Image (spheres, rainbow, N blue to C red):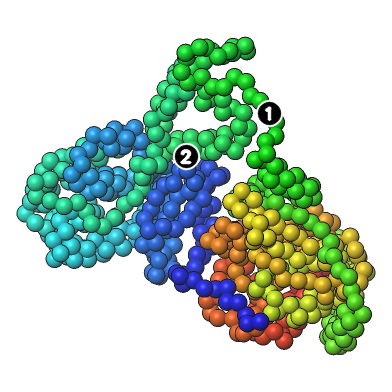
Amino acid sequence: MPSVNRFIQFNNETIDARQLMHYENVAKALTKNGMLMVSERKLMEFQPEEQMISISVFWRHREQSMMDAGRISDIYLLTEGFWKYFDINAWKAYLSERPVKLAKWMDQLVFCLEEFRLMEKIQKKRVGTVKLFAKRIQMYLAFHKQQLVVNSQKGFLADVFISYIYISLYEGTMHVDGPAIFQQANNIIQKVYENKDSQSSINVVYALYYLLNDYIKEDTLHDYYSILSPFNLPTTPFHYHQGMKDAEAGEEAKKETIEEIFRSWHRENEQENGVHLQYELEHGRDGKADQSISAEEGKEGHDITEIGQGQSAGNTTELKQDEHYKKNSNKAKKAGKSFGKEHIHVVFEEKRLNSTPTSNDKLLLQSYRQEQAPYVKAFVEEMKKRMEQKKIEKRVNLAKGRLSSKQTVLWTEERPKPFYKKTAPSTQLNAVFGLLVDGSASMQDKLEETKKAVLLFHDVLRKLKITHEVVVHYEDAFEASEKSQPNTFEWVHKLEDGQKDNGLQILSIEAHEDNRDGFALRWMGKRIEHRAEQHKFILMFSDGEPSAFGYAQNGIMDTAEAVVELERKNISVLHLFLNDTEASEEQLNLFHLIFGKKTAAASSLEKFSEETLRLLKKMLHHVVKST
């Protein structure tokens, strides 16, 4: 079967997941909002419904220092500026009153003036941001100077004025050339330096509109700002019943900042995810809240007051499907929020890998082990030698322990430490391992070599008496939907199995459909995080990037987040990319973004086992060294 290329991309640029997580942590700290997420879009933007802010792609393809400074300046502007000090009530009033002509141009100007005002405010509050914003201004000045020339040549006057006012604000009106009518606006532009709030910026924009609207005939062609869409503002509330009107009026008055809008969206989402029996109380008509509600003749709009229950011929199929689901979901567990925001609708099943080994399987297992025996023996002996050496090593220059025969330190050192200790002997390595095997369909053509690599892993750790677990993970692509994504974990070897030989189960590993890597990592993390072993490792075998229902775009970021979460719990995650050809630079870069430096690639099918052994050696050397 030909290898499936799982790196087909319409946009070859991949998100630097770890950097984005860093920006997200900064944003959460500045806003004190633990639910806030950060994404990258064309322009800076707030998306309250998704609890997300977006930094601009403007900073891509620049020097690393400039890119970092620009993105962090976006974060500061959004979270320390617009988040706290942009007046939503003034903005809503402006949107309801502004002229239709040049509406987009006016919106862009409001955000441009607010950016200037808020940037000054942030720099006064946080002096350390001055250098960041200096780099930001430098890049945007170069951009607007170029756009001023280009748009002037094309006759896009609305766009020309956006660049004209930007350059005027940051370099002064003396340093910018433009049409004579624009220069008449200089006195109005000077008032921007006196702006104290959002309403002041709006007033300046109106003054500019009345001066220039006869001269500028067409609205802006390009977008320069997209801070907050009118569609993301709270709509005028529908008064469900008389008793809620006063409460709603009081709540609306509080929504003066973007921070309040985010909180409102969050509360609404929480309520939607909660108990839906509140629906009738909140959305009912204006009937009296009496326990004995009865229908009033001739009164429009009243709900049905009696409901008949029973079965009809038309719903028998649906009922059978429900019964079938209930039977099959007895063992299923719901992931919920504890496995990350991308897996709220995941249901998962944990089970032993069912296998009925044949005589051919036993012969094949024997053949594999004979082939691998020299490598296993050499590896185990090397580890045992290292452990023996560690036993006889001394730890010297200690404040307590055995008194050393060399007492010269008593005279040569100001604070002598004349004691030493022998390392306590250890019968086995203090570590636990979890091996996650990608069970997706694209593994089909790599199964044989994957089984060999898993068998090698299993046999080495059994010989060294190290507790370990081997699990195949996959998602059912045919049953997955927006409301439910069924996942399965098949135990090939459980932690509780100890040194039991599960070689035949390894040979029963099969390929299935999709893989949800971030979810699988968190699941394995929960399996081993509370164990007593000092060193905890998760090794992930995969042949591509994460791919599951609704997970293609967010899978990379989510998996990287899972890796960082596990590392914070002192669980090391290592990754082996299984491929039948040499990994491309793009593929390697992607895995470095997800797993950091702890990723390796097998250049051919034959080297799966070799790379597995190399990774095991790396992990166990670390364990021996720190024992």
The answer to which of 7 and 262 lies nearer the viewer is 7
Quadrant the C terminus occupies: bottom right
Rendered location of residue 151, percent (x, y): 18, 62
Measure the alpha-carbon separation of dots 1 and 2: 41 Å
Q: Residue at x 12, y 51 (%)?
A: 217
Quadrant the N terminus occupies: bottom right
The answer to which of 307 and 590 lies nearer the viewer is 307
Task: Report the amino acid beneath label 1.
Answer: Gln
Q: Residue at x 40, y 66 (%)?
A: 60
Residue for badge 1:
309
**Is 564 on the left or on the right of 389, as rendered?**
left
**Is 22 on the left or on the right of 595, as rendered?**
left
Task: Report the amino acid beneath label 2.
Answer: Phe
Near mark 1 (Cα within 10 A), the count class, few <14, some 14-19 or many ≥20, is few
The answer to which of 609 and 298 lies nearer the viewer is 298
Q: Is residue 564 visible?
A: no
**Is 200 on the left or on the right of 426, as rendered?**
left
Q: Earlier in the sequence, mark 1 or mark 2?
A: 2
The answer to which of 261 and 410 lies nearer the viewer is 261
Which residue, as the protein is rendered here, is positioned at the far left? 180
Q: Residue at x 67, y 44 (%)?
A: 318
Near mark 2 (Cα within 10 A), the count class, few <14, some 14-19 or many ≥20, is many
Q: Is residue 364 above or below residue 316?
A: below
Rendered location of residue 75, percent (x, y): 43, 52
Q: Residue 378's quadrant in the figure?
A: bottom right
Q: Which mark is residue 59?
A: none
**Is 584 on the left or on the right of 428, as rendered?**
left
Q: Provide the secondary structure element on which disc 2 rests.
A: helix
Q: Provide the secondary structure element on which disc 1 rests.
A: loop
Rendered location of residue 431, percent (x, y): 82, 65
Residue for badge 2:
262
Q: Residue 238's quadrant in the figure?
A: top left
